[in-house]
């Protein structure tokens, strides 16, 4: 184990982690055991695993009632998809023994009234493409796992963070966040909405992070921002909105973290 940190911040992509890095001081890169990423659209640096430790400059009310606080964190980039998210987070928990895991980055908006740039906070999490209903499981439920990852503590954590983010005049909402190894575009978005009418967002990692956190008994919160609206131009909108979404997510983290420590 490298060192204990209270807060482990995880992002799938380098661009998402960079927005958090810009709010940190004394950031120091660490070695890790993982191979590099693959090729293709969205690959390159986005597929590389990285790990670092540093101090996040929080905003809002600090633990001692000050206007700001400094939080020692580990910042880990996992790569895209549920397998990478699960593998790297499992390693990171063993490496840093965190008391809280926060997932930052971008997501697609599923709720009809959600807008690009809105900060989404997970009060519960489910797999969008898990299907074992023929054996008596619920839609989105992996056999042997809960139908959704959440519960009262998760809802309370999301509620505290939501209040802090809204107090900073950032658009935000909490609810069910979905994950699966598919980028949700218009051709599949309606089917996903029909199966999960209460879902607010879709991404490719947050439920996998929540699953690992559940197994390892570490509190978890996804705090992402909407980069696209799962529309016919979702692929283009993702690239247009990624940096804006990553920045909104990082700013929300800085405002929410004092309420979560």
Image: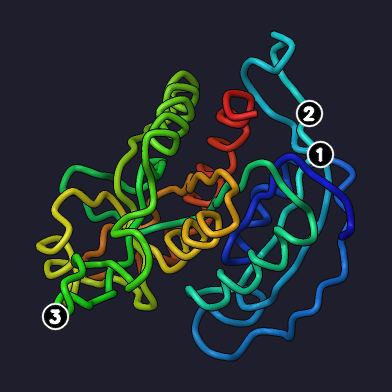
The answer to which of marks 2 and 1 sits earlier in the sequence is: 1
Tell me the residue that label 2 is attached to: 70
Q: Specify few, some or many for label 1: CA neighbours under 10 Å numbering under 14, 14-19, or 20 or more.
A: some
146 and 192: which is toward the camera:
146
Tell me where residue 102 appears, x and y as whole percent: 58, 46
Q: Specify few, some or many for label 3: CA neighbours under 10 Å numbering under 14, 14-19, or 20 or more.
A: few
Badge number at residue 93:
none
Spot the residue most to the top: 65
Tell me the residue that label 3 is attached to: 134
Residue at position x 28%, y 74% in the image: 130
Above/below status of 63 relative to 206: above
Q: For the residues marked 2 and 1, what is the alpha-carbon distance in whole angstroms?
A: 6 Å
Residue at position x 32%, y 73% in the image: 143
Tell me the residue that label 1 is attached to: 55
**In this picture, residue 63 sits left or right of residue 192:** right
Residue at position x 16%, y 48% in the image: 112
Q: Is mark 2 on a helix, strand or loop?
A: strand
54 and 130: which is toward the camera:
130
Above/below status of 102 relative to 155: below
Type of colouring: rainbow
Do the numbered discs 2 and 1 sit on residues whose CB atoms are within 8 Å?
yes
């Amino acid at each position: 184990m490298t060192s204990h940190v209270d807060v482990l911040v995880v992002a799938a992509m380098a661009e998402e982690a960079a927005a958090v890095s810009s709010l940190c001081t004394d950031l120091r890169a660490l070695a890790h055991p993982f191979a590099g990423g693959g090729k293709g659209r969205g690959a390159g640096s986005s597929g590389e695993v990285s790990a670092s430790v540093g101090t996040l400059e929080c905003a809002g009310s600090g633990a001692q009632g000050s206007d700001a606080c400094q939080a020692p964190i580990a910042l880990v980039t996992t790569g895209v998809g549920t397998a990478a998210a699960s593998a790297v987070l499992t390693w990171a928990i063993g490496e840093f023994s965190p008391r809280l895991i926060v997932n930052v980055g971008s997501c697609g908006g599923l709720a009809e009234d959600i807008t690009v740039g809105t900060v989404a906070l997970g009060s519960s999490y489910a797999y969008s493409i898990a299907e074992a209903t023929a054996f008596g499981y619920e839609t989105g439920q992996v056999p042997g796992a809960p139908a959704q990852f959440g519960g009262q503590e998760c809802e309370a954590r999301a509620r505290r963070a939501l209040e802090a983010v809204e107090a900073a005049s950032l658009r935000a909402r909490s609810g069910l966040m979905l994950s699966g190894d598919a980028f949700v575009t218009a051709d599949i978005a309606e089917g996903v909405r029909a199966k999960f009418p209460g879902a607010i967002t879709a991404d490719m990692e947050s439920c996998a992070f929540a699953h690992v956190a559940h197994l390892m008994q570490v509190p978890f919160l996804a705090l992402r921002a909407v980069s696209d609206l799962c529309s016919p131009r979702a692929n283009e909108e993702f690239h247009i909105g990624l940096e804006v979404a990553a920045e909104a997510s990082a700013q929300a983290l800085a405002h929410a973290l004092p309420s979560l420590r």
